[in-house]
Image (cartoon, rainbow, N blue to C red):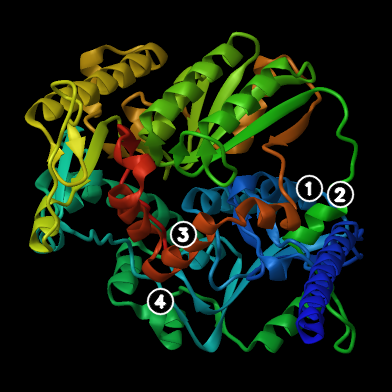
Amino acid sequence: MKSFFKNVLANIVAIVILCAVFFIFFIMLIVFSSMGSDKSVTVKKNSILTINLTTDILDSPTEEKSDFFSLSKESKSVLIYDVLEAINKAKTDDNIKGISIEADNLKAGITQIDDIRSALEDFKKSGKFVYAYGNGVSQSSYYLGSVAEKYFLHPAGLIELKGLATEVVFFKDFAEKYGIGIEVIRHGKFKSAVEPFLRNDISPENKEQLSTLLNDIWKNTSSKIAASRKIDTAQFRTAVDSLYGMIPEQSLKYKLVDKLAQKSEYDNLLKSKLSVKDKEKLNKISLSNYIKSYADESKSGDKIAILYASGSINNGDGYNDIYSEKYVKYIKDLQENDKVKAVVLRINSPGGSANASDEILFELQQLKKKKPLVVSFGDYAASGGYYIAMAADKIYSEPNTLTGSIGVFGVLPYYKDLANKNGVRSDIVSTNANSQYYSALHGLTPYGVTMMTRSVEGTYKRFVHFVTQNRKQTFEQIDNVGGGRVWSGVRAKQIGLVDELGTLNDAVKFAAQKAGLKSYNVASYPKRMNAFEQIFNDLNEDEISARIIKNKIGKANYEILQQITDEKLKSEVKMEMPYQIKIN
């Protein structure tokens, strides 16, 4: 008996010690985290501002992901607005002598790179230099780096300059093989988000819009690269088609780079540029640290609020995407905040739930009655992402923004054949004619199809109605450019889906002008979580499982899988865009 109680007592002591260890561990992490965030940063004289591999450029605070190992480290993520402000500030900062781009695999969206390139072009007007260096350079990194006055490549390096392509994965045969039925209801011949479930190849309509979209984006991107590098258009096309960037000597021959050099040789060149002696240290400061160096400057007075809406649109509460419950609260808070004189809604979303989009739009319409509301588009503003913009006083789009996709669909999978093949049957007892209009085993009844079709059509008409009001066009005009079709920002401006081509900064300046403000501060919403808060926000079984699966099969395939398996998504009418285009 004594032995039994001894074991019990030993187990209790072990549990108490383990809990104490975890408690101390978390306290230490909190301390380390706060120590890292309180570090002051001083910009040394004769410094170079560096855009490098360690910095993630985010469109929104909600895009930041943390893990246990990042708690004691300084955050390297910076918002695009802060990046542009930093480059603008560096232009007149006597301590900053130039900018060095040293990013082989830039973590930034296409419209973000566009904005940074424009800011760097403006920076060069100050007379300060912009140089770039690469090893194994991705296409997106080269797109940014090509803006430099001189581009240096490692003698054994490469540039993955290849143009744009898209690959669509189809699941129709897979579903049929394993007995999975998929009921699809959509409006719009271009609403191709559901094509992977219906076909084994790209439809002519989808091929048309994809070709137009890719060519629009590549024309804009490639022309800027060629102009910056002073390369003839035909010669540049030859270099891209032939993948000459993969061979260092060919990169040099076709003027994609200025010189082949080791990294130490490049650093020595920068020292020479700054008149730094060989044995002296070259002062480099990263974007994130440079932003911290002046981040504590006064933020009192009138404010322009940037409300970031990034990710898919969902019902309920959450942080890392756009959740209606949370965003309704954000919007109401901004409406009641007297210090906030105008709001810029920054949208970077392919859409999602029609119901959630409608909730958010309504609250934005109420906000607009009290103060100016200006919209800025990032990489995506499609379907539900475009829908919530319809409360705006003015809409700014980037030239390469994927815009529009005015269309609606519903996807309802069922598993009758799969179940029957494995000896599973079901029978139904109900009280009313359509109590079981849909089930996972039987699918939709004919009347269920009729009513779901009416629901989709009704949602589409409501979508177009709000677009006609905001864009001041007829139903027929919007329907002609709708039908689920995605446009580049350039074409969206031509057909009247947006007001101006411009950056987030342009939207902020217009909002200030509309609010009659000559001096103001910019505040970001939602507030950025620190690493510790982010971990506990994400620390649930579903989130952990989702991250594991997403890492294994890729984000795009995971989102398609969600449409089949996620109970929350199956019954919803969706406003969503199927594309994610990146200059990799």
Label 1 to label 3: alpha-carbon separation: 40 Å
Secondary element at image label 2: loop
**Of label 3 and label 4, which has the lower sequence position?**
4
Badge 3: residue crowd in 10 Å (few <14, some 14–19, many ≥20): few
Location of residue 267 with respect to 311 vertically, above or below: below
Instruction: Give the residue type that dot 1 points to.
Output: Lys
Choose mark 3 or mark 4, whichever is in front: 3
Q: Is residue 131 above or below residue 262?
A: above
Of the pair 21 and 81, the residue shown nearer to us: 21
Measuring from the top left, give residue 450's x and y in whole percent.
12, 24
Q: Residues within 10 Å of mark 4 (few under 14, many from 20)?
A: some
Q: Which of the pair 82/317 is nearer the observer?
A: 317
Q: CA distance from mark 1 to mark 4?
A: 35 Å
Residue indicated by mark 3: 546
Q: Of circles 1 and 4, which is in front? A: 1
Q: Counting other residues with Cα less than 10 Å from the Cα at mark 2, is it few (<14), some (14-19), or many (20 or more)?
A: some
The residue at which mark 4 appears reads as 254
Quadrant occupied by the C terminus: bottom left
Q: Amino acid at mark 2?
A: Tyr
Taking 311 as reference, is 559 left or right? left
Instruction: Give the percent coordinates (x, y) of residue 286.
Output: 75, 65
Q: Are marks 2 and 1 in contact (CB under 8 Å)?
A: yes
The kind of residue on which mark 4 rests is Tyr
Q: In the image, residue 325 lies at what x, y percent?
A: 56, 29
Q: Which mark is residue 294?
A: 2
Spatial CA distance of label 2 from label 1 is: 10 Å
